[in-house]
Image: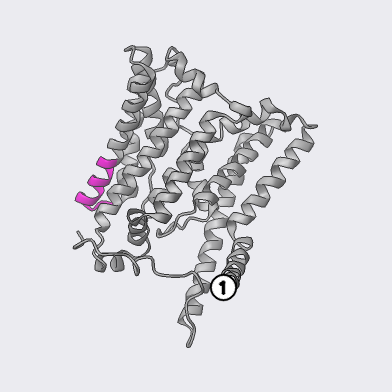
């Protein structure tokens, strides 16, 4: 009886925090926006074919948002998300169309190549000490040139029919590519929230000094974050290749803004130390709804980008104001940090020395 009472007492504050969270706000926006689009389209948006198309092209925004979120959680930026995705997609297309490589080996080569590029990027940042913004900007430029070298001015569309079939597969009108993106989000959530390596990532981003004093190598966490970010981009490229009628040098060109917008709107901190997997997924839903509304009402695409950019700036400013307010409360005499505000490195096991 006492256990049930204690469980209920602990659940009430948790539910209260959830209902006041960014995630709950985004969930309400998604439901409201979806219903509104369905009503304004006279119900056609609720039909199976429309739902299938909507979810099929939602997979990539989810994955690139998660990829950027992983870099942000250690206080890094990854400007090469779009260029890496475009290069990887063209690499897969060229391997299949020009060299006759079967779909599975081509996809594996593409994803592993993307992960290796992320690993090398992280190592270069650590070894040189150059800001990740500059390094990923240079990586982006190199990859854009490599992507053009692979595809030129053509569209590569003669690749595996098996991969295309997987891209179009939609059991119960739920695309397989969308389910793959959700599975990746679930695995990432389990990694960051439930495993020691995931907690070390958050510790290295939240308080690097405390993490080093706890024996956590912050340099190693930067390399891991960029490798994991690139892995997610590689998966996004594979799903995009499967879904699109062809790949060319324009693939990935419009990925950079959504990759930042999803985690920032979803609640991830630019300063590192936090992740918001569900919030990032829901923010990708919101941006996809905005894009669908643009097509439905023939809106100017520039206004959509303006709106998304405005929301991102507003979210950053609002988060900064909230953080300043919390810091003032903590500094006040007799005040303790708000519930849930715990230094992430405090409870972590040591690793035998930081590097």
> Which of the 4 quarters of the picture holds residue 274?
bottom left
Q: How many marks?
A: 1
Q: Quadrant of the N terminus?
A: bottom right
Q: Tell me if I can see residue 246 in this picture.
A: no
Q: Position of residue 334 (x, y in %)?
A: 48, 87
- Quick one: 348 or 231, which is closer to the camera? 348
Q: Secondary structure at mark 1?
A: helix
Q: Is residue 88 magenta?
A: no
Q: Position of residue 18 (x, y in %)?
A: 60, 61
Q: Position of residue 203 (x, y in %)?
A: 35, 62
112 on left or right of 69 = left
Query: Is 216 rendered above or below residue 85?
Result: below
Q: Is residue 125 magenta?
A: yes
> Which of the 4 quarters of the picture holds residue 35?
top right
Image color mode: one colour
Q: Quadrant of the C terminus?
A: bottom left
Q: Residues within 10 Å of mark 1 (few under 14, many from 20)?
A: few
Q: Residue at x 59, y 57 (%)?
A: 22
Q: Position of residue 229 (x, y in %)?
A: 37, 43
Q: Tell me if I can see residue 241 in this picture.
A: yes
Q: Which residues are magenta?
A: 119-131
Q: Residue at x 19, y 50 (%)?
A: 127
- Quick one: 37 or 258, which is closer to the camera? 37
Instruction: Return the residue at label 1.
Output: 6
- Quick one: 135 or 1, which is closer to the camera? 1
Q: Residue at x 56, y 62 (%)?
A: 318
161 on left or right of 224 = right
* Prevailing SS of the magenta stretch: helix
């Amino acid at each position: 009886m006492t256990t049930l009472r204690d469980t209920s007492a602990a659940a009430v504050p948790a539910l209260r925090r959830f209902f006041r969270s960014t995630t709950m706000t985004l969930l309400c926006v998604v439901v409201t926006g979806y219903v509104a689009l369905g009503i304004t389209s006279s119900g056609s948006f609720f039909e199976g074919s429309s739902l299938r198309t909507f979810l099929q092209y939602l997979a990539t925004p989810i994955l690139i948002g998660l990829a950027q979120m992983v870099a942000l959680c250690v206080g890094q930026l990854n400007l090469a998300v779009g260029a890496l995705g475009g290069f990887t997609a063209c690499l897969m297309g060229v391997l299949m169309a020009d060299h006759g490589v079967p779909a599975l080996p081509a996809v594996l080569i593409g994803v592993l190549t993307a992960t290796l590029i992320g690993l090398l990027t992280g190592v270069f940042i650590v070894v040189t000490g150059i800001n990740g913004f500059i390094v990923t900007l240079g990586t982006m430029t190199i990859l854009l040139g490599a992507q053009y070298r692979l595809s030129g001015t053509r569209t590569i569309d003669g690749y595996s029919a098996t991969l295309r079939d997987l891209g179009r597969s939609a059991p119960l009108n739920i695309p397989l590519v969308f389910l793959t993106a959700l599975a990746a989000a679930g695995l990432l959530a389990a990694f960051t929230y439930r495993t020691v390596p995931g907690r070390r990532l958050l510790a290295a981003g939240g308080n690097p000094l405390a993490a080093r004093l706890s024996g956590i190598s912050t340099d190693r966490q930067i390399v891991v974050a960029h490798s994991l970010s690139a892995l997610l981009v590689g998966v996004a490229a594979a799903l995009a290749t499967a879904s699109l009628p062809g790949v060319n040098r324009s693939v990935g060109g419009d990925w950079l803004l959504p990759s930042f917008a999803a985690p920032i709107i979803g609640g991830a901190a630019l300063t590192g130390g936090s992740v918001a997997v569900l919030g990032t997924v829901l923010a990708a839903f919101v941006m996809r709804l905005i894009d669908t509304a643009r097509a439905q009402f023939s809106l100017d695409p520039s206004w959509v980008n303006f709106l998304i950019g405005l929301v991102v700036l507003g979210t950053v400013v609002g988060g900064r104001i909230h953080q300043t307010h919390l810091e003032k409360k903590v500094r006040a005499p007799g005040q303790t940090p708000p519930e849930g505000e715990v230094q992430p490195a405090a409870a972590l096991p040591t690793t035998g020395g930081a590097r």
